[in-house]
Amino acid sequence: MAAFGREVGREPFSRTVCGESILFWRTGDGRVTAMSDRCVHRRFPLSEPPSHLVGDTVVCGYHGFTYGADGVCVAVPGQTRIPRTARLRTYPVVEQDSFVWVFIGDPHSAATLPVPRAPWLDMAGWTTVSGMEPLAARASLLVDNLMDLSHETYLHGGYIGTPEVADTPITTEVDDAAGVVHVSRRMADAACPPFYAKSTGITGRITRWQDIEFTPPCLYTLHSRVAPVGVLPNADGTDPDAFHVEVVYAITPETESSTHDFWAVARDFALDDEQVSDFLRESNRTVVLQDVAALNVLERVLTGEPDGYQELSINIDTGGLAARKMIARLAAGAP
């Protein structure tokens, strides 16, 4: 994921994804364009003023080279001949579920790989709050963090963490065919953390489910269900007496040691209550920033650590280890 759809408009902006600086803007008919943010002439960033759009072309603010939405140069100052090599790299883009996805690899392979879905973020019957925080740490640390939610008890106490999260065992399933890692924690009788007590109005203890789906390399969804103790879904699968929250993270590497931490929280209750939206937005951002602070420290520790350190893993790490394995297989080009 490169951006939220709301971030991309007629004002070009740049974001670095996997070490590549990419220029994003919308054409007159609303399509998102993604191309290299470097003029082919002297490498001036096309996102920097006085570079600007003229219709559906972008004009370099240094020497005036002009490019169409396909990245091909259409005008060179002082001459009519345009060099054949005067073209910018362009990137396949998909906009869905309020996200803008960009394909960094071989563009001919883009159509063969499905873009993972997060439909609740742009669906009737749900309300969403979202944001992004920069992380000065490698993306794999955020994957580890999200796959092991036992840290909520210790790092996020007073927001989403309670003792039951760390004390309850998990189950882990790996669907190699679908390319998804599932981690589930079901708490039958748990304290209700402020994140849910204040947003749902539940008092007392709760039944709390945390069902994780991770689609490597970067889309993470936590299907969260809370209800009064003993309240379970109906036999037909309907669940009218519970509150459902979809917590979505898109974990996008900026560089080898920095990450774009995109997050979104969708809910199926209090849809028009701005106070609930404000509370969930600020609470989740606080939780994200707590993770950011911890992972930034961890990145500094790992960077200064001597080679050969033997990492210790335990039962709660099975989901994270499965995610690591699947990502390594993708990186190696294995099916």
Image: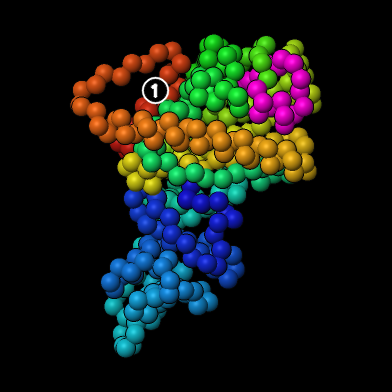
The outermost residue toward the front is 158
The answer to if 144 sits in the magenta stretch is no
Residue range corresponding to the magenta coloring: 193-210
Task: Residue 252: give x, y in percent of width and height.
Answer: 44, 43
Q: Is residue 26 above or below residue 263?
A: below
Task: Residue 42: give x, y in percent of width and height.
Answer: 28, 71
Q: Badge 1 is on which residue?
A: 321
Judge left or right: residue 43 versus residue 277: left
What is the total number of numbered labels drawn onto the structure image? Answer: 1
Please name the residue shown 76% across and 23% down the image: 202
Could one spot residue 200 in this view of the protein? yes
Judge left or right: residue 278 versus residue 52: right
Tell me the amino acid under the disc marked 1: Leu
Crowdedness near tag 1: few (<14), some (14–19) or many (≥20) residues, C-alpha within 10 Å: some
Could one spot residue 238 in this view of the protein? no
Judge left or right: residue 1 versus residue 44: right
The quadrant of the picture occupied by the C terminus is top left
